[in-house]
Amino acid sequence: MRRFFYDTSNNTNTPFPKLSAFSIGASVELTESIVHHWCRVLRANIGDQGILFDGFGGEYQVELQAISKKHATVTLLAHTNDDRSAPILTKIGLVMSRGERMDYAIQKSTELGVTAIQLLSSHHGEVNLKPTQVEKKLAHWQQVAIAACEQCGLNRPPLILAPISINDWLKSTTSATPINTETTISPIIAMLNQDAYYQALQQPADLRLQLSVPAAGQPAMPKALLTVLQQPVPYIELLIGPEGGLSNEECAQAADVGFEPWQIGARVLRTETAPVVALATLHALCN
């Protein structure tokens, strides 16, 4: 069955209730984006069934009850409490790249269960967004993550955080700074920041790792990694630089706030490949 993210923000001043506010058998109005995708693009009919999830855990099997030109309602048939979130909380500080490479990095990181992605600009980075571009690009990248959730079965979308300079981000990692939902997160998922699952990101990470270029004499794996992965729900922050790498100053600043170098293999990975390899490796080591 098709899966759809139920956007409780509804892009209006009147947010929709969480799905958990309804009882099984209740009628629920679909959001505009689902109406467009399911009813118009996919030409769904009354009686067709699908899956809704709103990011607060679990998902609902629904059946289309009524369809009009601009609206549609469904009946909630059943609730499944499955949480397919990764057993590791991960936040990636990712220096932005251009075009499809950035979309790829976000899409595949989502499929591998990343919890949040902090977009970064850096000295050697290719992308520096103008203030007028941030809102549109942030909404686009959040939609890339949501579409990946709909495809892969994840029912808690990662938070895509508005870009800041790598220097500012590294300074903020030493303190628990609440996320400002008005400026940092797309309105699409702003309400999710109130959920306990995402609130855990406000705490200091158990381990900070900087993916680095292979270097002689550098350990392949930080000694603390395997120990941290044995914790019930480890929280790991990853720093991934641009194609040109981080500057010496940025590397030194990262080391000063506790980021340990981590080289995975003997090859130099592209910036869109590194998150995939890092997350897959963490999950393999955790199992």
Image (tube, rainbow, N blue to C red):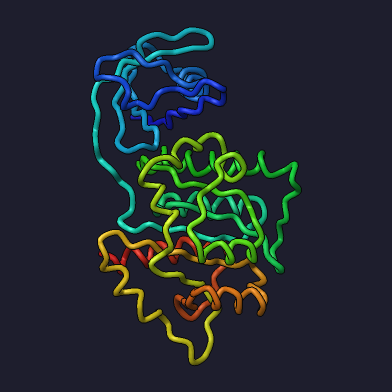
Q: Is residue 47 left or right of residue 169?
A: left
- Residue 154 vertical placement versus 9 (above, below): below
Point 71% across, 68% down: residue: 123
Q: Is residue 251 left or right of residue 130?
A: left
- Residue 25 vertical placement versus 177 (above, below): above
The quadrant in which the N terminus is found is: top left
Horizontal and vertical percent for residue 60? Answer: 30, 28
- Residue 100 vertical placement versus 216 (above, below): above
Horizontal and vertical percent for residue 201? Answer: 43, 54
Point 52% across, 48% down: residue: 179
**Residue 230 occupies quadrant:** bottom left
Point 46% across, 76% down: residue: 262
Q: Is residue 262 left or right of residue 50?
A: right
Horizontal and vertical percent for residue 226? Answer: 31, 74
The quadrant in which the C terminus is found is: bottom left
Give 242 or 133, whichever is nearer the viewer: 133
Q: Is residue 246 left or right of residue 286?
A: right
Which residue is outermost to the bottom?
217
Horizontal and vertical percent for residue 2? Answer: 37, 30
Give 111 or 28, whichever is nearer the viewer: 28
The mark total stands at: 0
Point 45% across, 54% down: residue: 202
**Residue 172 occupies quadrant:** bottom right
